[in-house]
């Protein structure tokens, strides 16, 4: 490309022409930025392909399978691009193993549950409606991509931060513990269901100390993954992650998961608590009220019954909207339970 340069020298205007080519390699996109962008494209392609096949065949069996394969594809792409090796081998290997274990278990468990139930009730009356069915696949695309952000960030990093820091070790331990708790909770409840749902509500094993230990495990995983990603920032300087917009972008992973599990209607606590408790208050109101009063909503712990109500409503996320009967007729036992909680 030819450049024309105007110069003013010794009172005389001169025009100089030179020929050169633009060197765009001098302004490269950050490696992590490209990997994150490409991963979004891969996710869109996988989910759109899954939707088309599922709609043509009028089946939902591809849904969870494509979600699981999408997770694995993003892990593989981010760790292998561009030359089959990751710069930060130790963190990348650790994060990828934890990620594959987590998402592999989720795929296995959802597939088993759908088989046991003879189908997936989420898609009743949905598969036949192309627009609505596509919304489900679009939501899954966002879910898969956003949840995967920390591991894509770690695997796509060209930085070499060195040995694990104390923060890295804590984050890895938290992630591993979250996986363990989710797997343990899912298995214990599945066994309880297979044995006939003794006592009407699950209070075996870890469920004795938390009303939703599986949700706590999921939340712990993605907050820990985001913290682990801190040391993989490509930004310069000490504590570079704090000034790295891409690392802050990755906080969408735990925030999205938290919103889905705590606030989204039709899933998580909004579905399991509130009016979802009717079956317990109809069948065993006294027993369930006592269990609820003394059992944490998320964090497995002992002594929950001794914690003041204001702490339960704030720090422990046991919000009033999760109470049975909010906005409707509250059973006598449900009201009684709330009164007992207020006297804590």
Image (tube, rainbow, N blue to C red):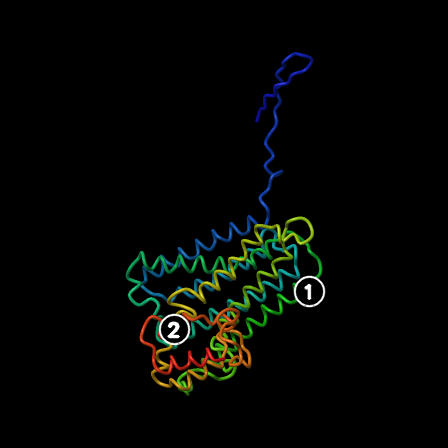
Pinpoint residue 61: horizontal percent, then vertical percent. 38, 67
Near-viewer residue (245 or 48): 245
Looking at the rendered image, the quarter that the N terminus falls into is top right
Mark 1 or 2, which is nearer the eye? 2
Near-viewer residue (264 or 117): 264
Residue depicted at 62% across the width and 69% down the height: 173
According to the image, label 2 marks what residue?
Answer: 274
Pinpoint residue 112: horizontal percent, then vertical percent. 43, 74
Quarter residue 90 falls in: bottom right
Above or below 249: residue 343: below
| Count of numbered circles in the view | 2
Marks 1/2: CA distance?
40 Å
Secondary structure beneath dot 2 equals helix
Badge number at residue 184: none
Residue depicted at 64% across the width and 61% down the height: 91
Above or below 28: residue 131: below
According to the image, label 1 marks what residue?
Answer: 166
Pinpoint residue 197: horizontal percent, then vertical percent. 40, 85
Pinpoint residue 166: horizontal percent, then vertical percent. 69, 65
Q: Residues within 10 Å of mark 2 (few under 14, many from 20)?
A: some
Near-viewer residue (259 or 67): 259
Quarter residue 115 falls in: bottom left
Above or below 117: residue 259: above
Query: Farthest residue toward the front?
Result: 343
Secondary structure beneath dot 1 equals helix
Residue depicted at 42% across the width and 83% down the height: 288
Query: In the rendered structure, are the residues bearing label 1 and label 2 in contact, judged by CB atoms less than 8 Å apart?
Result: no
Above or below 241: residue 179: below
Q: Residues within 10 Å of mark 1 (few under 14, many from 20)?
A: few
Left or right relative to 54: residue 184: right
Q: Earlier in the sequence, mark 1 or mark 2?
A: 1
Left or right relative to 312: residue 27: right
């Amino acid at each position: 490309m030819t450049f024309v340069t105007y110069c003013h020298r010794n009172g005389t205007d001169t025009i100089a022409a030179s020929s050169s080519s633009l060197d765009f390699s001098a302004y490269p996109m950050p490696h992590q930025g490209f990997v994150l962008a490409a991963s979004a494209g891969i996710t869109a392609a996988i989910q759109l392909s899954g939707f088309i096949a599922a709609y043509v065949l009028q089946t939902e069996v591809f849904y969870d399978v494509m979600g699981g394969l999408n997770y694995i594809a993003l892990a593989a792409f981010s760790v292998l691009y561009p030359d089959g090796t990751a710069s930060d081998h130790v963190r990348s290997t650790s994060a990828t193993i934890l990620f594959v274990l987590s998402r592999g278990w989720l795929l296995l468990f959802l597939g088993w549950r759908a088989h046991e139930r003879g189908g997936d009730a989420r898609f009743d009356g949905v598969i036949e409606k192309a627009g609505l069915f596509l919304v489900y696949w679009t939501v899954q695309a966002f879910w898969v991509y956003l949840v995967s952000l920390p591991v894509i960030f770690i695997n796509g990093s060209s930085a070499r931060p060195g040995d694990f820091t104390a923060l890295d070790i804590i984050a890895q331990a938290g992630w591993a513990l979250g996986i363990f708790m989710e797997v343990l909770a899912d298995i214990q409840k599945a066994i309880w269901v297979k044995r006939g749902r003794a006592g009407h509500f699950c209070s075996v094993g870890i469920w004795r100390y938390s009303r939703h230990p599986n949700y706590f495990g999921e939340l712990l995983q993605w907050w820990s993954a985001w913290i682990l990603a801190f040391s993989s920032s490509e930004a310069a300087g000490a504590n570079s992650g704090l000034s790295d917009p891409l690392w802050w972008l990755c906080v969408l992973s735990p925030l999205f998961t938290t919103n889905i599990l705590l606030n989204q209607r039709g899933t998580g606590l909004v579905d399991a608590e509130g009016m979802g408790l009717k079956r317990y208050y109809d069948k065993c109101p006294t027993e369930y009220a006592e269990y609820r009063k003394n059992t944490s909503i998320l964090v497995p712990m002992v002594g929950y019954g001794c914690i003041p109500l204001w702490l339960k409503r704030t720090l422990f996320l046991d919000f009033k909207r999760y109470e049975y009967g909010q906005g409707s007729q509250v059973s006598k036992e449900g009201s009684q339970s709330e009164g007992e909680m207020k006297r804590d």
